[in-house]
Amino acid sequence: MSAGSSRQPPPRPKTIRRRRLVAGAVAAVLVLVLGILLAVLVFGRSSTQLPRFVRSGSPPATVITSGGPVAALRSGPPPAFTPLPAAVMHAGALSLQQQVAQLFLVSVSGHSAAAIAKRGPVNWGGYVLGRENFGGDHGLAALTRAIDASALPAPAVAPLIAA
């Protein structure tokens, strides 16, 4: 090489490996930092926004905190279920067969009032209507009217219609 030449010799393989290792380490740290920032932005909440559970000796109540409504913890057994007096009176007027039938939802095949008549004179708890029951708006309206009309006279309960 002459004294006036500015040409440098090629880097040695050891130097290339060191540069690649440093570049890989910098990239890994950068990805880690970006991941932490993203997690803080997406999931970051200060501790004041988290729901707080409150222990109470009174019956369960809803406690509004900055995190939203949270049911309070109970300090004892759950309260006993007490049905409404009107519900007890109504259920007492039904026969055992009618009481059991009120627990069931049944499906209907077809989209006419004749399909309801096939179910017999039982006051089912409700009817589940599906795609096969849809025969247009007027047909569906006629079917639901037939379901309401099929309810036996008092003390019948109006059936639930689920679609």
Image (tube, rainbow, N blue to C red):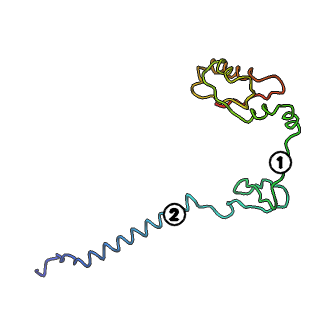
Asked if residue 156 is positioned above or below residue 85 in the image, the reply reads above
Rendered-image quadrant of the N terminus: bottom left
Left or right? Give the position of 33 relative to 47. left
Residue 30: give its label: none
- Front position in the image: 150 or 36: 150
Residue visible at 83% across and 53% down in the picture: 79
Q: Amino acid at mark 2?
A: Leu
Q: Residues within 10 Å of mark 1 (few under 14, many from 20)?
A: few
Q: Mark 2 or mark 1: which is in front?
A: 1
- Front position in the image: 54 or 81: 81
Residue visible at 47% across and 67% down in the picture: 33
Rendered-image quadrant of the C terminus: top right
Residue at the disc numbered 2: 37
- If you read the primary sequence from the N terminus, does the residue marked by circle 2 or circle 1 appear first? 2
Residue visible at 86% across and 38% down in the picture: 88
Asked if residue 30 is positioned above or below residue 99 in the image, the reply reads below
Residue visible at 68% across and 23% down in the picture: 144
Residue at the disc numbered 1: 81
Give SS at disc 1.
loop
Query: In whole angstroms, how far apart are the C-alphas of marks 2 and 1?
Result: 49 Å
Q: Amino acid at mark 1?
A: Phe
Give SS at disc 2.
helix
Left or right? Give the position of 46 relative to 71. left
- Image quadrant of residue 122? top right
